[in-house]
Image (cartoon, coloured by chain):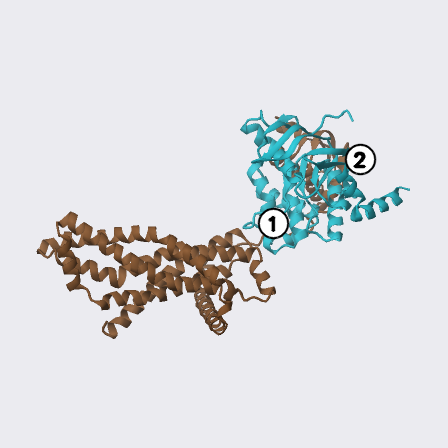
Chain colours: A cyan, B brown
């Protein structure tokens, strides 16, 4: 693992008022991997994601994305960096007054000079890549089901062919079958597009099936990071409960059988 | 920056078109690439066979992959076989992914222009007015039913909610109502004095102020203010509740949203409007008196005694009787529009605007109807 990390977080401290959410947290994301960040509710998984993409201010520490230090980057550098990542928000965050097609076209229209024909073709291409049909393109976000919303939001996140995709709880609110489909979709897209995926989740199934590495977040820091096997050996009480608990245990058992 | 030439170069030799691609076939160059690709697509019709060498390509993303796919599709449509060489395995999967997309043509729905569309818009507008009136009548009926139901079971009335609304709609509106009506009273007095002075009839400006304020202006200004202030907030509140399915949740728990949310709000408006109108009228008369004193040197005693002669209880009653009806109209319109909000942020804005515009319009229409009514009964 000598590759230069795509995202590198050092000694990050984030807090609101008197509470410290992230306490000197350090984490590396390697190129081309799918990193899953797990943690209990309120442990600061989403806070970590939102701090990396610059939606929340940090108190201390350093964040470097694609070799750019976010503190030192000026307006122009930041903008060009933001074009190189895509974000899938938990609720999709599709613009409700635009159709799905217009949602996907929005980043393309703003950042690239494209002919209307190419704009249409690319939008439909992205929608078909995430498994939506051309018939869905002219629907409004309010007319979509939960799974379709996530897919459309993923298409928008992928609109500019980013190098990194941030996913905030991509499978929450989906039934197990849709969630499985969505996991498979992320894996396929990651392979074909060579993406680096930073995924916040507490879906055990996703962790087992798609993540190359897992980072467990507890007490404001990363208590374990590595492939599944490393995480299972971690002695931290929260990690133990999470993976060996009633729901985790069943899956761990199943994975154990598969490995054997 | 990579020059256009190196992105795609064409060589045409005895019926054989050889293309060499290079540089970055990525989103950033998609525009130049498209014109290049379209250029060679036409050349291909003259060629017997076509080959494209992708060895020189350093970066390749979905934009590049789609344009390559589009190129090969155009060739195969023209009956020419194209061979692609030198594409790395990884990019080949991306190209394969692209071969499935955009097969079914689905252009965005074409927009039409012209006379027919204009006529259709007029028709739809007329139908919309009818639908609006029907909607208001429906809401009025629903509120009536809920009110009767609550009368038989008074304990079901949302008293806390009503008090909270009364605080927001009535009590918190007092300062702004006082200020605006005070200014309006002053302005009317000044204008009256200025114009009546030419006839030496300054004293009659007091008649003007008194009658105008008590009969018409006081209640109208207050109603318009409340429609803009509270009607819009009712629509936005109910609308965002619609968006987050809160109203559906209420329904499934066996509550009637009209009884829980709308009845207290509308009742509060019916109570608040007369109260605010009274306060507003007093502030306007005070403002008129102050201007008469400062501008025309009319002493307060003269102003008050003139006012006593000019106005009667009838004028006061005419204004106050109208107030609760205006409150009812504002409440019905605001709540109806609120329940029409769909899922999008745009629709929330649209309905809120519609709520304010329609309630102000209806308030003025109602005022006109009352004027006819009071004239015919001699009030």
Mark 2 lies on residue: A234
- In the depicted view, which residue is nearer to us: B103 or A12? A12
Disc ID at residue B152: none
The image position of residue A53, as x and y in percent, is: 61, 35
Q: Quadrant of the N terminus of chain B?
A: top right
The image position of residue B300, as x and y in percent, is: 15, 53
Secondary structure, mark 2, is loop
10 Å neighbourhood of mark 2: few (<14), some, or many (≥20)? some
Side (left or right) of B301 relative to B258: left
Secondary structure, mark 1, is helix
Mark 1 lies on residue: A100
Side (left or right) of B56 relative to B305: right
Of circles 2 and 1, which is in front?
2
Which chain contains the residue that carries disc 2?
A: A
Does label 2 or label 1 sit earlier along the sequence?
A: 1
Side (left or right) of B304 relative to B57: left
């Amino acid at each position: 693992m000598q590759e230069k990390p795509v995202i590198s977080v050092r000694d990050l401290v984030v807090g609101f008022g008197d509470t410290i959410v992230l306490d000197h947290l350090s984490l590396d994301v390697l190129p081309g991997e799918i990193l899953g960040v797990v943690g209990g509710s309120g442990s600061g998984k989403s806070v970590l994601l939102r701090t990396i993409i610059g939606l929340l201010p940090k108190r201390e520490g350093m964040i470097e994305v694609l070799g750019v230090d976010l503190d030192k980057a000026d307006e122009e550098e930041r903008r060009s960096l933001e074009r190189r990542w895509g974000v899938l928000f938990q609720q999709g965050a599709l613009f409700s007054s635009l159709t799905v097609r217009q949602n996907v076209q929005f980043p393309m229209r703003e950042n690239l000079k494209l002919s209307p024909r190419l704009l249409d073709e690319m939008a439909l291409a992205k929608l078909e890549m995430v498994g939506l049909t051309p018939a869905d393109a002219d629907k409004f976000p309010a007319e979509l089901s939960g799974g379709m919303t996530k897919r459309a939001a993923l298409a928008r996140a992928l609109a500019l062919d980013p190098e990194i995709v941030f996913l905030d709880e991509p499978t929450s609110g989906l039934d197990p079958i849709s969630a499985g489909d969505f996991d498979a979709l992320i894996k396929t897209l990651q392979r074909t597009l060579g993406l680096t995926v930073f995924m916040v989740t507490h879906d055990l199934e996703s962790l087992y099936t798609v993540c190359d590495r897992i980072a467990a977040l507890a007490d404001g820091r990363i208590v374990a990071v590595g492939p599944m096997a490393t995480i299972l050996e971690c002695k931290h009480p929260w990690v133990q409960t999470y993976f060996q608990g009633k729901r985790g245990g069943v899956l761990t058992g199943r994975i154990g059988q598969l490995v054997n | 920056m990579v020059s256009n030439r190196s992105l795609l170069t064409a060589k045409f030799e005895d019926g054989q078109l050889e293309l060499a691609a290079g540089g970055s076939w990525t989103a950033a160059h998609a525009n130049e690439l498209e014109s290049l690709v379209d250029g060679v697509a036409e050349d291909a019709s003259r060629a017997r066979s076509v080959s494209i060498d992708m060895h020189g390509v350093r970066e390749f993303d979905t934009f590049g992959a789609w344009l390559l796919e589009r190129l090969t599709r155009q060739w195969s449509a023209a009956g020419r076989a194209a061979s692609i060489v030198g594409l790395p395995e990884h990019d080949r999967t991306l190209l394969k992914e692209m071969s499935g997309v955009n097969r079914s043509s689905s252009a965005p729905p074409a927009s039409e222009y012209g006379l027919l569309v204009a006529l259709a818009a007029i028709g739809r507008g007329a139908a919309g007015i009818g639908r609006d009136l029907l909607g208001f009548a429906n809401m009025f009926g629903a509120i009536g039913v809920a009110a009767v139901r609550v009368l038989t079971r008074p304990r079901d009335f949302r008293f806390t909610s009503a008090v909270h609304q009364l605080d927001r709609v009535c009590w918190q509106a007092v300062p702004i109502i006082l200020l605006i009506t005070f200014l309006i009273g002053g302005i009317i007095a000044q204008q009256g004095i200025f114009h009546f002075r030419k006839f030496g009839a300054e004293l009659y400006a007091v008649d003007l102020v008194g009658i105008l304020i008590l009969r018409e202006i006081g209640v109208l200004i207050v109603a318009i203010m409340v429609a803009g202030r509270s009607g819009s907030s009712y629509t936005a509140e109910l609308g965002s509740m619609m968006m987050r399915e809160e109203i559906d949740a209420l329904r499934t728990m066996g509550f009637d949203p009209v009884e829980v949310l709308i009845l207290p709000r509308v009742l509060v408006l019916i109570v608040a409007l007369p109260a605010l109108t009274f306060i507003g009228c007093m502030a306007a008369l005070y403002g008129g008196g102050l201007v008469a004193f400062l501008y025309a040197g009319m002493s307060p005693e003269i102003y008050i005694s003139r006012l006593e002669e000019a106005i009667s209880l009838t004028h006061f009653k005419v204004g106050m009787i109208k107030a609760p009806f205006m409150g009812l109209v504002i409440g019905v319109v605001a709540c109806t529009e609120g329940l029409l909000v769909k899922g999008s942020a745009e629709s929330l804005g649209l309905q809120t605007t519609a709520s304010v515009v329609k309630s102000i319009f209806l308030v003025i229409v109602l005022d006109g109807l009352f004027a006819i009514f009071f004239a015919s009964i001699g009030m």
